[in-house]
């Protein structure tokens, strides 16, 4: 099977189960989804809905029990550690809730870290575009401890973008930020999808954050239950409220 | 609180194992030393009680200080026989006899004596094979000599005694009670009585001792008193039991010293252990900041927090002591076994015992060391404000000013103590000074670590993982510094010793090259039984007449008594030759041949003694019946040769214990080849394989080769201190890996390969180890130079650096760094990416 044009990442009937027997927990119960290129997709759902698990499986950070995951033309499912490592290095970017910057490196070194690890040259023009977009020009020589939370997360965003990955996965990127900084980061993610054509997948439980996305997918009990295109925050919040009433038929 | 501590302990098994290991090794060394020496002591006590099993009373000549004991006459033996209650009295002859093996080399032991005796047939020796010697050219040999030299009955055996090589026919082989080959690895041989007297004592009708057995019903004590009454005051009369105890005590005194040396090295290992434990607890406390502050916020007092950390240390110390004691018993037993079987000691081991001292010291040392090392981090932990718990801020670097000032003061105090120690030649002060200086330097290392680590790191960080590794090692200067300081201790001690020995070698070389104008040196190798081997003065005459020799002189040496002072004296055959070859210059008087009642000495010794030209000195020579008066004939000016030796005329040598020449020096005629002359002189000593003729460089090499042995021994003994330091590196890395789990997870998430993660950890490890080695080399060189300075008057005038050795240590440190990184690196590489990122 080869990926059709316009799809950056794809899950095909993905199941994820933890434990076995009576203690078995089904986190994903046959999720199939296609994430289009150059779009900003948000995955939403209440706690325990499986939204983080889905992202981890898509990003090759976790393996699936059944089904297949593809990133671009690469079949992620079945890759060994080395293949997964290279996939993460070359095709995927990450933004975490905890920023996760290396305290020993300057902001610039943190941004170019994925390239340095892969032994690749930094595309200076692209680097400049990214740095100017996140507004970190005058902070490049600072260490993470000298930066505010919002600045740190913008460094993390720049790091995810600088290697031009197929997909950037963001896991609750605004979870540790105040609303002002959060808005800046979300605005930046939105712009990079619209202006640079960067595919972005964000997991969040914040309806306001989800309203920045082009498409919002709702998960409940390991299944995709709803989908909205370019919704407002109110619409998302409304949908979330209704999700509680949705009964998911288990297969 | 107690429960919380135990729970926290158990939940971190790895931490427990790592911090305990350093204590375990130190305690193992301590208890192992005790077990080893205790076992050996009891073995030697057994050995001597069996050696004197057949002796009820033993008579030996009374020794007067400075005089050689008078031999026992046959009349005295007859007198003892006549004492009522005596069942038998046998005159024994005993003296040094060194067998020559089938390979032509003199056979050696590792400490046990090589001796000959007269075959009396009445001792505890039993003929195993063959018969007793009857003719003058026959001997019976001990079974151990036979087995180790592969001699059989009927073989010829060459022996060195007071006389040069003589060959005998082996008529039999004897063993000891219980079929033992030897009592303690000694090489022994027995002659007929007249031969033994001639070869071993150098005179006819003389005995070294009388072995007396008691008739039934006579007690040892009663017999001793009766014999003593009969013989009068010129003899020492002892019971066999007393003699056994005396000899065992003598050996055990030596073992005690051996034990002190081992304990000294154990102390160094534990000292290093303190660094490691201190570091481990500091890291653990840093990682437990949240946990401890949470306890504080829930109302735990500072005392309880301190108690919690100290209790953790106590439990670790206790467990480590038990394990260390057990391991020490094993190691001690193993070493005793090796000691008794390897190297020809052939000692019958008494059962392995665990002395109380081993148990007490293990627990005392293990627990005290651990608790002491934990107190500082505990105090720091108690100062953490409860609010810090909730903030996830990394503990900011505290300024290094305070620690640096304290470090400088402590290092200065240590240096001062060291200086005083050298001045007063006080060993405790020297060692104390060195240890205190180490602590001072360790406190200074955090300051040094920033520039040093970045310098060393730059050499290694050509790739991203390398750069990260370097940055990580510079991240916590205190932690890096203390880990490196632990490695510093061992390396600096070895380097210091090695600087001193290299300087000594260089001094000797310079002395040989500059001041001694001799081409060939004839010397006897050292002998375990006492003085070095010698040759007869007549042979020296032949050397002088050898074709190509322009001049030669030699000396015999002995200790002489001046009042209560034991002095070293040489009887020189030719003073003008000595003056010329040693380049002696007069200080007062004229350097000319000494009359029979004259002596000469150095400027320094004359100043020390307060003697000047014409001073009359009364000396007791070993074989002289009366003290003799000598007049100071000349004093030579300051020089490096012949330090602290009185020069006596050749005639005085007759009254030495042996007038044999121990060392001789010769110069060849201009134009003659040294090698040719050597070839012509060597045959004169063909029957005396213990004497060697060497040219100057060979002689220097032989003299300095003992330094290599010393260095090797110290390296082996310090290996444990270095091993513990390596554990410290592993420990620091492992704890750092745990601490940086999230970062490692991130690096893996953004695409760092496992191999790259391992390289990153390895670089960090190598940077720390090399930093430790560089510190060690620097401190070692400083210690070595201080020692050399202090020993200037002892003849170490040159300064030499063991460059090769120092480079080796650096390389070894780098290799050690790679090895230390293996386990932490594997652990880091195996981290599950998702778990690691979510790690709190």
Image: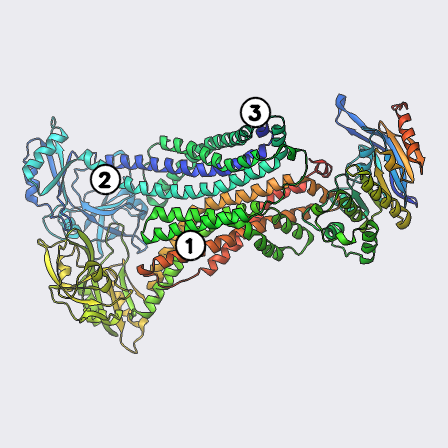
Which is more foreground, mark 2 or mark 3? 3
**Numbered tag placed on residue B27 in the rendering:** none
| SS category of the residue bearing label 2 | helix
Read off the chain for label 3.
B
Chain of the residue that carries numbered disc 1 in the rendered image: B
Indicate which label's residue lies in the foreground, 2 or 1. 1
Q: Position of residue B463 (x, y in %)?
A: 68, 54
Q: Quadrant of the C terminus of chain B?
A: top right
The chain to which mark 2 is attached is B
Badge 3 marks a residue whose secondary structure is loop
Give SS at disc 1. Answer: helix
Quadrant of the drawing holding the N terminus of chain B: top right
Q: Residue at x 23, y 44 (%)?
A: B172
Residue B329 vertical position relative to residue B642 in the rendered view, above or below: above
Residues at marks 3 and 1, CA–CA distance in whole angstroms: 47 Å
Label 3, on which residue?
B1
> Does B122 sit above or below residue B792?
above
Q: Identify residue for label 1.
A: B783
Q: Is residue B811 above or below residue B184?
A: below
Residue B770 horizontal/vertical position (percent)? 55, 52
Crowding around mark 2 (Cα neighbors within 10 Å: few <14, some 14 to 19, many 20+) is some
Q: Distance between the residues labelled 2 and 3?
A: 58 Å
Q: Nearer the viewer, residue B245 or B386?
A: B386
Badge 2 and badge 1 in a common chain: yes
- The residue carrying mark 2 is B247
Image x and y of residue B672, in percent: 29, 76
Measured in 3D between alpha carbons, the distance from the residue under mark 2 to the one under mark 1, in whole angstroms, is 39 Å
């Amino acid at each position: 099977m080869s990926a059709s044009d316009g799809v950056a990442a794809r899950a095909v009937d993905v199941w994820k189960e933890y434990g076995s027997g009576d203690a078995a927990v089904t986190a994903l119960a046959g999720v199939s989804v296609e994430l289009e290129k150059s779009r900003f997709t948000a995955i939403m759902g209440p706690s325990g809905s499986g939204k983080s698990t889905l992202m981890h499986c898509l990003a090759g950070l976790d393996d699936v029990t059944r089904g297949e995951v593809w990133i671009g033309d690469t079949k992620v499912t079945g890759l060994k550690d080395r293949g997964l490592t290279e996939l993460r290095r070359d095709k995927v970017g990450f933004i975490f809730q905890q920023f996760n910057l290396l305290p020993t490196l300057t902001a610039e070194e943190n941004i170019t870290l994925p390239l340095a690890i892969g032994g690749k040259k930094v595309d200076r023009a692209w680097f400049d575009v990214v740095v100017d977009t996140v507004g970190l020009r005058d902070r490049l020589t600072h260490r993470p401890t000298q930066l505010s939370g919002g600045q740190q997360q913008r460094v993390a965003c720049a790091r995810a973008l600088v290697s031009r990955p197929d997909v950037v996965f963001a896991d609750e990127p605004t979870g540790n930020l105040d609303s002002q900084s959060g808005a800046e980061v979300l605005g930046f993610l939105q712009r990079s999808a619209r202006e640079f054509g960067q595919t972005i997948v964000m997991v969040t439980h914040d309806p306001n954050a989800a309203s920045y996305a082009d498409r919002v997918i709702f998960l409940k009990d390991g299944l995709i239950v709803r989908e909205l295109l370019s919704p407002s925050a109110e619409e998302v919040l409304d949908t979330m409220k209704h999700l509680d009433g949705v009964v998911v038929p288990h297969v | 609180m107690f429960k919380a501590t135990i729970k926290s302990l158990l939940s971190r098994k790895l931490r427990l194992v790592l911090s305990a290991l350093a204590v375990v090794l130190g305690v193992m060394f301590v208890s192992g030393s005790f077990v080893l020496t205790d076992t050996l002591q009891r073995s030697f006590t057994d050995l001597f009680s069996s050696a004197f099993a057949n002796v009820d009373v033993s008579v030996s000549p009374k020794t007067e200080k400075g005089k050689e004991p008078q031999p026992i006459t046959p009349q005295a033996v007859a007198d003892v026989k006549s004492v009522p209650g005596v069942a038998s009295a046998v005159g024994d002859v005993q003296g040094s006899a060194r067998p020559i093996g089938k390979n032509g080399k003199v056979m050696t032991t590792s400490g046990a004596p090589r001796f000959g005796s007269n075959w009396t047939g009445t001792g505890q020796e039993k003929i195993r094979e063959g018969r007793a010697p009857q003719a003058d050219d026959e001997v019976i040999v001990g079974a151990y000599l036979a087995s180790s030299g592969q001699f059989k009955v009927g073989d010829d055996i060459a022996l060195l005694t007071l006389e040069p090589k003589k060959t005998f026919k082996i008529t039999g082989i004897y063993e000891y009670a219980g079929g033992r080959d030897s009592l303690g690895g000694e090489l022994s041989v027995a002659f007929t009585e007249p031969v033994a007297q001639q070869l071993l004592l150098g005179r006819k009708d003389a005995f070294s001792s009388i072995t007396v057995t008691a008739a039934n019903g006579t007690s040892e004590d009663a017999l001793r008193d009766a014999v003593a009454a009969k013989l009068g005051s010129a003899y020492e009369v002892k019971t066999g039991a007393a003699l056994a105890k005396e000899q065992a005590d003598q050996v055990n005194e030596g073992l005690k010293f051996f034990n002190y040396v081992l304990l000294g090295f154990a102390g160094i290992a534990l000292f290093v252990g303190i660094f490691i434990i201190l570091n481990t607890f500091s890291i653990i406390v840093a990682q437990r900041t949240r946990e401890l502050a949470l306890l504080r916020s829930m109302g735990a007092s500072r005392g309880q927090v301190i108690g919690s950390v100290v209790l953790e240390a106590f439990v670790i110390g206790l467990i480590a002591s038990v394990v260390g004691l057990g391991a020490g018993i094993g190691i001690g037993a193993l070493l005793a076994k090796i000691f008794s079987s390897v190297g020809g000691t052939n000692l019958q081991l008494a059962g392995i015992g665990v002395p109380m001292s081993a148990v007490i010291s293990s627990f005392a040392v293990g627990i005290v060391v651990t608790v002491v090392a934990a107190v500082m981090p505990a105090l720091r932990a108690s100062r953490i404000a409860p609010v810090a718990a909730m903030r996830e801020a990394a503990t900011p670097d505290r300024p290094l000013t305070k620690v640096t000032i304290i470090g400088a003061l402590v290092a200065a105090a240590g240096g001062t103590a060291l200086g005083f120690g050298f001045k007063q030649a006080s060993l405790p002060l020297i060692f104390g000074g060195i240890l205190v200086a180490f602590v001072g330097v360790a406190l200074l290392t955090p300051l040094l670590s920033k520039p040093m680590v970045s310098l060393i790191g730059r050499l290694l960080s050509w790739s991203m993982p390398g750069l990260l590794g370097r940055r990580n090692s510079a991240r916590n200067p205190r932690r890096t510094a203390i880990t490196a300081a632990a490695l510093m201790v061992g390396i600096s001690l070895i380097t210091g010793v090695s600087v001193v020995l290299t300087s000594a070698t260089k001094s000797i070389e310079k002395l040989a090259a500059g001041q001694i104008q001799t081409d060939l040196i004839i010397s006897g190798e050292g002998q375990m039984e006492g003085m070095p081997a010698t040759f007869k003065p007549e042979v020296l005459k032949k050397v002088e007449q050898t074709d190509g020799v322009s001049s030669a002189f030699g000396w015999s040496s002995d200790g002489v008594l001046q009042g209560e002072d034991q002095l070293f004296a040489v009887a020189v055959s030719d003073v003008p030759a000595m003056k010329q070859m040693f380049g002696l210059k007069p200080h007062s008087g004229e350097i000319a041949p000494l009359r029979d009642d004259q002596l000469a000495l150095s400027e320094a010794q004359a100043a020390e003694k307060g003697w000047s030209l014409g001073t009359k000195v009364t000396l007791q020579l070993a074989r002289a019946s009366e003290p003799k008066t000598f007049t100071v004939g000349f004093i030579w000016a300051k020089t490096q040769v012949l330090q602290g030796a009185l020069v006596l005329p050749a005639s005085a040598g007759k009254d030495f214990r042996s007038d044999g020449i121990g060392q001789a020096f010769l110069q060849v005629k201009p134009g003659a080849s040294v090698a040719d002359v050597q070839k012509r002189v060597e045959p004169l000593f063909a029957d005396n394989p213990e004497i060697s003729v060497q040219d100057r460089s060979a002689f220097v090499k032989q003299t300095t080769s003992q330094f290599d042995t010393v260095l090797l021994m110290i390296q082996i003994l310090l290996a444990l201190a270095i091993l513990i330091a390596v554990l410290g590196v592993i420990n620091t890395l492992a704890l750092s890996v745990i601490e940086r789990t999230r970062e490692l997870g991130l690096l893996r998430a953004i695409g760092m390969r496992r191999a790259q993660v391992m390289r990153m950890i390895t670089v960090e490890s190598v940077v720390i180890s090399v930093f430790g080695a560089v510190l060690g080399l620097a401190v070692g060189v400083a210690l070595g130079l201080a020692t050399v300075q202090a020993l200037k008057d002892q003849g170490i005038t040159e300064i030499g650096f063991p460059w090769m050795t120092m480079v080796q240590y650096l390389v070894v440190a780098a290799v050690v760094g790679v090895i230390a990184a293996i386990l932490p690196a594997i652990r880091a590489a195996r981290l599950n990416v998702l778990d690691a990122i979510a790690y709190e």
